[in-house]
Image (tube, rainbow, N blue to C red):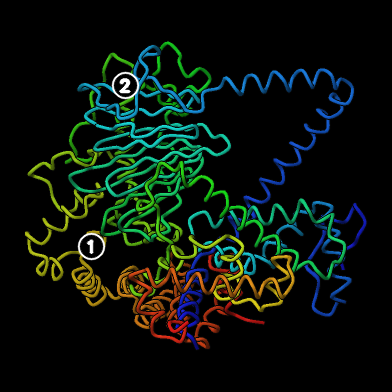
């Protein structure tokens, strides 16, 4: 066989593996159904329109001429203003609000980008279809109006958030190289360190947290307020975004602080200015998002559904206020408190300094699993392995350590046989455990990737029997055979 | 068996194995034409692997794979009333997949000159769970494929990455077998020349007989 054909075989095999891993069936079904529904409505409108056109073709001709004239006079590039309707911005302009304030760039298509307190961003590029905005540090909210060919990119460090029409909030810590993206509407694709090259698609209601060591995707706390951006008039007199109060919040003061963790710093103080109110509310929302992604001290926490390229989400905890990434860590804090704020690197550093080995021998069950989570999400696979094994040895009834060891073997070491072994153990010891569906799915993937066709088939059949509607059902069907 | 009457279309169910495949296919297409949501789901379940393989072969497993794949299924649903031969459903879908991917590749090329994302910042063609060498080879392969004329690129990727038979490639590209062979020959020559300029692929292609051409 020629070298090129050998190369192509290798490419084809790699692609098959990749395709086996991703399960887009339900997403495609949903999108196709939505598009067809949209198309039906459009076709009804078109039918009515055509009837009118056939009656008055002369009117249509005039309308066409008007359209051509209008389109010829349309500017091919978006324009934008910063902070005031008359202050037109230019490519390269900085968005660096004074302390305690936010700064908004309002684009001619109605899109808005708002940079928060103590944050820096710049408009790098603008064209007819969108813009590229770089967030150097801090907090940025964007509301991008969807049009045909819309292409926006928000860059933060080595991360790129590609947008076609959505509302989202992002926090980038230049110091910690940590990115948090929370979606309110639509979806974005985030690429960058710590995730697969294809990136991660983040959808409405989800929060992505990414560092070079990995990424987690979690379901956002439902009651967290979403910013409401007025899109009707891009140059309205007061280009300010307001938090959208949920029904429950409507009767409360706009800036009622969320319950604070005992060792968390106070939430951003209220301000008489609307911009500042927005910043404060966003800080609280971001803190909730960060808290949502941090591991729970409980062993029976919820595990979010896996997304291609993203490590399994850490279990959720009760909402708490937490500093935005980049905020100095109080000296009196503990590694547990840092873990609850999703600051895993700092938490791991502190845990190591306090005596990791001793902790493995002495901590109670929940804390020991949390220590393993901290090491795993902090990027130290060896220490994570040590903590989880210690948890399994000392507390054999715990379910999460075996699952976590399987996930680490799968994701970090790509040792699929070892992963299968841990996942099998999980399913054997905890057949109805909270992570049983995920473990069974991972098991069939692991056997498949290990090249164990017969075991993969058996695992697939078991999966279809026990979890017929599970997220791995499409792959299981393919592997189960006729 | 699914009924063809309008009232029972919503009760469409996938045909059992014992049913006449042609009759089942006709009923399936009738249900699709009538807009039966269950038939739409069966369509995706049944043909997703094929469409995914062809689109991914043509473009790589890119982050917009889902977008292109859904475009294919929408095109199928919008055009199914034009399908004359029910037995040709699969090859027709394959053809739509190839042409949808071709449209996407061409659109990307048209926009490349005005792209504000520098080429080096564009996301790589992703391959997870592969070793580093393979990952780099896949990325380099698609970078080389990007330099080929679209029709030649499609012929090449359908034949060697999606692993279709020559006749299938010809049918999917809606050209004769002879034309597809000519495209393949040209594509192979161009690919080899471009691969020899690629630091990642050069060693690999130099090893084989292609190097002596």
- Image: B99 above or below B186: above
Q: Which chain carries label 2?
A: A
Q: Of the residues under marks 1 and 2, which one precedes in the sequence?
A: 2
Horizontal and vertical percent for residue A309? Answer: 40, 61
> A260 or A221, which lies in front?
A221
Q: Which chain carries label 1?
A: A
Q: How crowded is mark 1: few (under 14 residues within 10 Å), some or many (20 or more)?
A: many
Q: What residue sits right under mark 2 in the picture?
A: A277
> A234 or A5, which lies in front?
A5
> B27 or A433, which lies in front?
B27
Tell whether A1 sits left or right of B23. left
Q: Given this view, does label 1 or label 2 mark the residue nearer the observer?
A: 1
Q: Residue at x 76, y 41 (%)?
A: A40
Residue A467 shows in the view: no
- Image: A57 above or below B182: above
Tell whether B42 sits left or right of B68. right
In this rendering, the count of numbered labels is 2
Q: Are marks 1 and 2 in contact (CB under 8 Å)?
A: no
Q: What residue sits right under mark 1 in the picture?
A: A379
Horizontal and vertical percent for residue A365? Answer: 24, 65
> A70 or A83, which lies in front?
A70
Horizontal and vertical percent for residue A149? Answer: 55, 39
Q: Which residue is drawn at 72% across and 75% down?
A: B177
Q: How crowded is mark 2: few (under 14 residues within 10 Å), some or many (20 or more)?
A: many
Mark 1 to mark 2: distance in Å?
36 Å
Tell whether B35 sits left or right of A391. right
Horizontal and vertical percent for residue A301? Answer: 37, 58
Residue A46 quadrant: top right
Question: Most extreme residue toward the front, as rendered?
Answer: B213
Quick one: quadrant of the C terminus of chain A?
bottom right
Q: What element carries label 1?
A: loop
């Amino acid at each position: 066989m020629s070298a090129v054909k050998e190369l192509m075989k290798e490419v084809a095999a790699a692609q098959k593996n990749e395709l086996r891993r991703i399960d887009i069936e339900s997403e495609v079904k949903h999108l196709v159904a939505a598009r067809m529904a949209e198309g039906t409505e459009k076709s009804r409108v078109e039918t009515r329109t055509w009837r009118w056109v056939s009656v008055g073709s002369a009117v249509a001709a005039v309308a066409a001429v008007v359209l051509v004239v209008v389109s010829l006079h349309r500017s091919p590039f978006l324009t934008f203003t910063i902070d005031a309707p008359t202050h037109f911005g230019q490519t390269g302009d900085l968005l660096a609000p004074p302390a305690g304030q936010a700064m908004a760039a309002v684009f001619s298509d109605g899109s808005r980008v708002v940079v928060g307190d103590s944050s820096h961003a710049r408009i790098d590029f603008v064209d007819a279809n969108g813009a590229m905005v770089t967030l150097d540090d801090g907090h940025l909210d964007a509301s991008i109006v969807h049009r045909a060919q819309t292409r926006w990119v928000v860059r933060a460090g080595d991360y790129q958030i590609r947008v076609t029409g959505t509302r989202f909030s992002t926090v980038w810590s230049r110091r910690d190289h940590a990115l948090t993206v929370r979606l309110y509407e639509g979806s974005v694709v985030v690429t960058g360190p710590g995730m697969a090259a294809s990136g991660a698609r983040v959808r409405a209601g989800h929060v992505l947290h990414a560092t070079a060591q990995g990424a987690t995707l979690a379901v956002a706390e439902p009651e967290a307020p979403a910013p409401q951006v007025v899109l009707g008039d891009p140059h309205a007199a007061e280009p300010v975004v307001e938090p959208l109060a949920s029904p429950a919040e409507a009767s409360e003061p706009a800036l009622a602080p969320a319950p604070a963790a005992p060792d968390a710093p106070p939430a951003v103080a209220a301000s008489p200015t609307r911009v500042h109110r927005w910043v404060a509310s966003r800080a609280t929302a971001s803190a909730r998002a960060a808290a949502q992604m941090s591991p729970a001290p409980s062993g029976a926490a919820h595990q979010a559904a896996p997304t291609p390229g993203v490590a399994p989400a850490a279990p959720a905890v009760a909402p708490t206020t937490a500093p935005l990434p980049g905020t100095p860590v109080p000296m009196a804090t503990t590694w547990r408190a840092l873990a609850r704020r999703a600051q895993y690197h700092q938490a791991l550093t502190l845990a190591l300094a306090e005596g990791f080995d001793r902790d493995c021998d002495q901590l109670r069950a929940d804390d020991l699993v949390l220590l393993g989570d901290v090491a795993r999400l902090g990027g130290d696979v060896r220490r994570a392995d040590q903590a989880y094994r210690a948890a399994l040895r000392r507390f054999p009834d715990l379910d999460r350590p075996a699952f976590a060891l399987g996930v680490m073997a799968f994701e970090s070491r790509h040792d699929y046989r070892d992963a299968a072994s841990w996942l099998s153990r999980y399913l054997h010891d905890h057949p109805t455990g909270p992570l049983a569906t995920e473990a069974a799915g991972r098991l069939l993937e692991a056997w498949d990737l290990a090249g164990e066709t017969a075991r993969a088939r058996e695992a697939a059949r078991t999966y279809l029997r026990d979890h017929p509607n599970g997220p791995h059902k499409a792959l299981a069907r393919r592997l189960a055979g006729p | 068996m699914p009924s063809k009457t309008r009232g029972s279309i919503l009760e469409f169910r996938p045909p059992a194995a014992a049913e006449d495949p042609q009759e089942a296919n006709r009923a399936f297409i009738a249900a699709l034409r009538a807009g039966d949501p269950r038939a739409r789901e069966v369509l995706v379940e049944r043909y997703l692997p094929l469409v995914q393989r062809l689109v991914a072969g043509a473009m790589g497993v890119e982050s917009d794979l889902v977008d292109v794949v859904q475009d294919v299924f929408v095109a199928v649903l919008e055009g199914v009333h034009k399908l004359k031969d029910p037995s040709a459903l699969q090859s027709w879908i394959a053809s739509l997949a190839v042409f949808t991917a071709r449209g996407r590749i061409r659109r990307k090329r048209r926009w490349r000159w005005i792209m504000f994302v520098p080429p080096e910042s564009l996301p790589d063609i992703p391959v997870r769970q592969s070793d580093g060498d393979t990952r780099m080879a896949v990325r380099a392969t698609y970078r080389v494929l990007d330099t080929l004329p679209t029709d030649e690129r499609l012929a090449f990727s359908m034949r060697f990455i999606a692993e279709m038979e020559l006749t299938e490639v010809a049918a999917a590209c809606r050209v004769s077998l002879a034309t597809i062979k000519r495209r393949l020959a040209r594509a192979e020559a161009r690919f080899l020349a471009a691969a020899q300029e690629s630091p990642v692929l050069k060693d690999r292609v130099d090893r084989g007989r292609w190097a002596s051409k």
